[in-house]
């Protein structure tokens, strides 16, 4: 009675998820992931329908085709994961091959009085399908979806162990798994109900995590150049200053202003090109931000004044070479750069180091542009205003 109650709850649950993901698939027609999830639960729902109407169906459908429905549903979950990850598309062929190899056996065994053999083969097929999906989930390196992927993989691994054990008892030992261990039947039924509950919820969690990460990136990235915007710059700089306060590793900050850039042709396209070039010219540990039309900020961790001057001169020279390679530019691209550093000072704040770099930039522009200037105490005293 308990097993029958569990199976009834399972069928009702599958029907609910089928309806929900059906509406999600309609709402998000351009996204194939919820569509494949809907197909997965539709296959499960078809299996439940076969169960309810088994007395009115021929044996090859009620038993043979029906045994293929649950493995098919897990294969379709595999396809949903592939669509979501945009990787491992070749594994679809393995999932289809498993289904095609087992279907003739299910049909052949549909009239066998010992139904447990067909059920055991179904268990083995499910185990193979879920292990493919679990490997795909663990193989991905996407940080935003790490926790839901690990959760899904954990339950798939547990389900693989249970279903694999049932298949091994039947197909290797040659005994009915439910007779061999009454607990195994209960654990298998419960694990299936749990997996059909956890998998869709974890999938929703995974999609929401990626969406949240994308929204977060949009709030800290400049949409034209895809480098940091002001908000993203402040977050990075606060983190680096906090690291400096703890470990006393030097930190430099530079403001790069493109000289006469408003007079150049195709400004927006070349601003994006300059941002890409700046990202290539600095180190991977450095950060690039755009804070104005043609003004960029470079955050240079573990960099003192001497190292910053060398690096920034290389950046300035790289920008000059960029203009020589771009025929559409009517004027050379040069940059005035001002920078400041922590210089072993205590309690330095974001606003202060930004102001110092700006003051150094103003001096660089005043003294002829296309040069690199380090902040000095004279800049603070003079309080040089920006040139027009």
Image (cartoon, grey):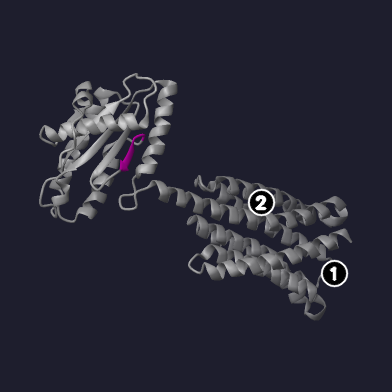
Residue 7 image-quadrant placement: bottom right
Residue at image point 58% right, 45% down: 147
Residue at image point 27% right, 45% down: 292
Label 1 secondary element? loop
Residues in magenta?
285-290
Q: Nearer the viewer, residue 352 or 162?
A: 352
Residue 303 image-quadrant placement: top left
Which residue is under mark 2? 156
Q: Residues within 10 Å of mark 1 (few under 14, many from 20)?
A: few
Give percent across and percent down for residue 31.
50, 64
Residue lying furthest right: 1
Q: Say whether residue 175 is visible.
A: no
Give percent across and percent down for residue 34.
56, 64
Q: Nearer the viewer, residue 346 or 13?
A: 346
In this view, the mark in front (1 or 2): 2
* Residue 333 within the segment the image draws in magenta: no
Q: Is residue 98 above or below residue 268?
A: below
Residue at image point 69% right, 51% down: 160
Which residue is under mark 1? 113
């Amino acid at each position: 009675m308990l097993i029958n109650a569990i199976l009834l709850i399972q069928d009702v649950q599958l029907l609910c998820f089928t309806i929900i993901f059906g509406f999600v698939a309609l709402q998000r027609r351009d996204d194939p992931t919820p569509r494949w999830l809907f197909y997965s639960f539709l296959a499960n729902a078809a299996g439940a329908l076969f169960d309810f109407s088994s007395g009115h169906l021929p044996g090859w459908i009620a038993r043979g085709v029906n045994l293929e429905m649950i493995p098919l549903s897990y294969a379709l979950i595999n396809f949903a994961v592939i669509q979501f990850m945009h990787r491992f598309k070749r594994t679809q062929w393995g999932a289809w091959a498993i289904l095609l190899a087992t279907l003739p056996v299910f049909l052949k065994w549909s009239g066998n009085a010992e139904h447990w053999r067909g059920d055991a083969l179904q268990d083995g097929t499910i185990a193979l399908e879920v292990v493919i999906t679990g490997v795909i989930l663990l193989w991905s390196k996407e940080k935003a979806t790490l926790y839901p992927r690990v959760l899904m993989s954990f339950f798939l691994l547990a389900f693989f162990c249970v279903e694999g054990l049932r298949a091994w008892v039947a197909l290797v030992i040659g005994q009915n798994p439910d007779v061999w261990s009454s607990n195994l039947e209960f654990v298998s039924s419960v694990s299936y109900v749990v997996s059909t509950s956890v998998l869709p919820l974890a999938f929703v969690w995974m999609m929401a995590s990626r969406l949240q990460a994308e929204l977060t990136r949009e709030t800290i990235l400049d949409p034209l150049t895809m480098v940091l915007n002001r908000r993203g710059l402040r977050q990075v700089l606060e983190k680096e200053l906090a690291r400096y306060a703890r470990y006393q590793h030097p930190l430099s900050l530079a403001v790069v202003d493109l000289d006469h850039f408003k007079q150049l042709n195709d400004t927006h396209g070349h601003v994006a090109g300059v941002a890409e070039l700046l990202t290539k010219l600095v180190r991977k540990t450095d950060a690039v931000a755009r804070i104005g039309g043609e003004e960029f900020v470079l955050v240079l961790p573990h960099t003192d004044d001497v190292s910053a001057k060398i690096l920034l001169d290389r950046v300035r020279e790289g920008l000059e070479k960029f203009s020589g390679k771009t025929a559409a530019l009517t004027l050379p691209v040069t940059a005035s750069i001002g920078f400041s550093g922590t210089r072993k000072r205590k309690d330095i704040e974001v606003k202060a180091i930004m102001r110092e770099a700006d003051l150094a930039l103003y001096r660089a522009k005043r003294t002829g542009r296309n040069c690199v200037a380090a902040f000095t105490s004279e800049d603070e005293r003079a309080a040089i205003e920006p040139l027009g």
